[in-house]
Amino acid sequence: YVGMSFVFSIAAAGLMIVVAAGNDGNANPDAFGAGVDTAGSGAVIIAGSIDENGAISDFSDRAGGQPDHFLAARGEAICCQYQDGKIFVDADGFVYLISGTSFAAPQIAGAAALLAQAFPNLTGKQIADILLRSAFDAGTAGTDTTYGRGILDIARAFQPLGTTSLA
């Protein structure tokens, strides 16, 4: 159990949290993720799962009541077993594929880490905002109750957002 005051402390320290939405196919993220989002005051992203075609995974909990901080990433049919640097194939010729919002969350966390490395002056809240604002819009136009802000788009996250001005 993570105390919500701990989540608030993490956000106040300038860090961010990525939490998996849940794998029940519900209209809302799990209560834990929703609570973390509320306590994180903008420094939290709830991760939903999409398939290889960008469709929300059947098992993935949806954005529901937390659409402003919900972001989807590939979490369905992820190959995660390697041996000696190659994809592991068992004696019967099978490759193991794993699915879950827990496989989408590390992709979003990795994107956040890349932004933090490239722009060390950014806070966790700013990084979360960039990832959410730069998302590929999916589903109903704009923020919606299925995809939330959309699908992770790391290339767009590294492009300038907003307007620029000269001093």
Image (cartoon, rainbow, N blue to C red):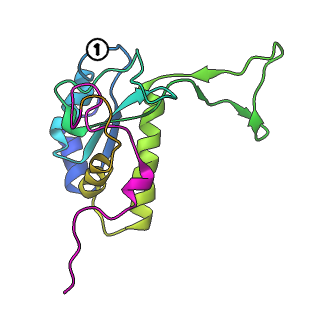
User: Where is residue 49 shown, x and y percent of the image?
Assistant: 41, 27
Helix, strand or loop at disc 1? loop
Image quarter where the C terminus lies is bottom left
- The front one of 42 and 32 is 42
Residue annotated with mark 1: 26
Q: Residue furthest front?
A: 141
> Does the magenta run of residues contain 162?
yes
Q: What secondary structure do most residues of the magenta stretch adopt?
A: loop
Specify few, some or many for label 1: CA neighbours under 10 Å numbering under 14, 14-19, or 20 or more. some
- The front one of 130 and 82 is 130
The amino acid on which the numbered mark 1 sits, given as a three-letter code, is Asn
* Residue at 71 percent of width and 21 percent of height: 95
Magenta residue span: 141-167
Image quarter for residue 13?
bottom left
* Residue at 67 percent of width and 29 percent of height: 81
User: Where is residue 150 shown, x and y percent of the image?
Assistant: 31, 37
* Residue at 24 percent of width and 29 percent of height: 140
* Residue at 29 percent of width and 23 percent of height: 62
Q: In this view, does 139 lie above or below 42?
A: above
Q: Is residue 118 above or below residue 95?
A: below
Image quarter where the N terminus lies is top left
Marker count (numbered):
1
Image quarter for residue 120?
bottom left
142 lies left or right of 49: left
